[in-house]
Amino acid sequence: MTVRCFSLIISLLFCQCIYAVDADRLWLPKKYQSIKPKLLQAANEAENTERCVTVIAGEMIVQKNSDTHYYFVITCRDQSARSYNLSYSYPISGTSIDLVAEQLSSLTHDKVEIVVVEDSVVDETIALQLCRNEINTSVDYLDGIEIIERDISPVKKQGSGFSYKIPLFAKSALGSNIRYQAHCVVSEAGGANVKLTLEREGAIAICRDSVRSEAIIYGRISIDEDQITQVDNTAVYRFQLPFEVKSQIGTAINYSSECSVDEHGEANVVVSLVTSGALAICKDSLRTETLLMKSVEINEEASQVISGSNGIFRLDIPFTAKISSGHVRSFRAHCEVDEEGDTYIITEIDSDAVVSVCIDELNNKTRNMKSVTILEEKVSVVRDSDEDLYTIGIPFNAKSPSGGQLKYQAECKIESSGRSRIKLRARLN
């Protein structure tokens, strides 16, 4: 009995050594509960690091999971009671855990480990810690610094000293990861010098945030990540970032933006409405304008931009619709839209179609006449812009029941709404 109790006590002590972390502090989505042992292992890995006194939280960042790895973030508390994060990549199949990034503390005196260089002897390990300390001191103007542990370059000899390339993340005002690279050189005597460079990936992240801030007046935007392009390869990063905004009725409106970022991470953004976006805005306005019309069909292929300078687009959009009589008429919409999406639109009967409309009306009017011949070369068109009215004169001939020639003149009037009326009278010549 005594032996059994002793064995049980030993077993419990052994378990506490292996799993010192309180499992209740770890959180996983319900569908991932089966992998809690992996998260627990990551938490214990973190607590066994020199800096971590105790693990206070742990979770999975689902959106950062890949097809092959889980992404865990463990929050530790250090000796100064400051919290910081350790990010781990854990294979879905396997147990080879990998430290991805370690967040540095927000206060310099909390994150610097004192390094004593005895007899001016600096080795690779001491050099790397001196680099970490110098990063903490020289770039403490950045927020939320995380050194990307797995991407630290192998050490290089720099004369009688050492050189490291140390990538790191800093947090933008919107919480995005901005990637930098610190080039650190450590002398034989232990002096460290760091030069910080903004990486292309970090510049793009800055541009994403800047475009979202600049375009906030349009609402929630969606940047087309696949279409982000770098304009040139100068010392200043310059990118084009196309994005779209959903209108109130769900139409996608396209914009372009050009973002330049200097070596200090300062961004300048210019947002422009593109032709397809202007057309989308005009189409929405046209649908509102023609709300009382029936069977409206917009001819997108025939739509054209008349001008698009100084941020003002003028578009001509043909469409068809049924009028109250049930006839289908051809119309044109003249739309003007500015960079803010404000539009001015007018619709009218298509001037190129008024003659054919009147000829159709005439054919319907004279369907009981014999041998009707329209003199198309003598058709006249007069527009009264004050009354928004077209008057079309159509001379035509017909035959009487006895075979004699009859001369007529048709006067057809068409309103901008597409309504038409026609009158016939005799013609002298």
Image (cartoon, rainbow, N blue to C red):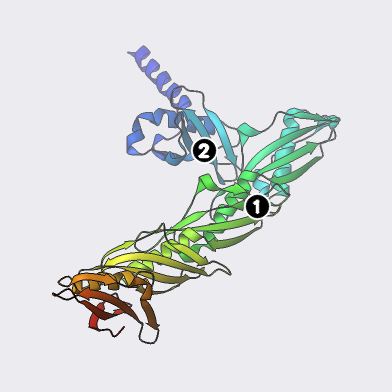
Q: Position of residue 50 (x, y in %)?
A: 61, 33
Q: Residue 23, position in %: x, y?
A: 40, 34
Q: Could you say which disc has been placed on residue 247 in the image?
A: none
Identify the image quadrant of the C terminus.
bottom left
Disc 1: which residue: 238
Q: Quadrant of residue 299?
A: bottom left
In the picture as drawn, the residue positioned furthest to the bottom comes out as: 386
Is 75 on the left-hand or right-hand side of 327? Answer: right
The residue sitting at 64% across, 46% down in the picture is 110
Towards the viewer: 337 or 12: 337
The image shows residue 90, relative to residue 177, as above or below, that is: above
Dot 2, crowdedness within 10 Å: few (<14), some or many (≥20)?
A: many
User: Picture coordinates of residue 250 (x, y %)?
Assistant: 36, 59
Discs 2, 1 touching: Cβ within 8 Å: no
- The front one of 72 and 224 is 224
As measured in the structure, the alpha-carbon distance from the residue carrying label 2 to the one carrying label 1 is: 44 Å
**Residue 325 appears in the figure:** no
Q: What is the secondary structure assignment of the residue under circle 1? A: strand
Q: Residue 353: horizontal and vertical position, in percent?
A: 35, 69
**Is 117 in front, or is 332?**
332
Which of the 4 image quadrants contains residue 287?
bottom left
The three-letter amino acid code for the residue at tag 2 is: Thr
Relative horizontal placement of residue 208, taking residue 180 as reference (left or right): left
Residue sitting at 44 percent across and 71 percent down?
335
Q: Label 1 crowding class (10 Å Cα cut-off): few <14, some 14-19, many 20+?
A: many
Q: Nearer the viewer, residue 34 or 215?
A: 215
Residue annotated with mark 2: 54
- 2 vs 1, front mark: 1
Can you say which quadrant of the picture contains the N terminus? top left
Residue under the image location 71 percent in, 28 percent down: 154
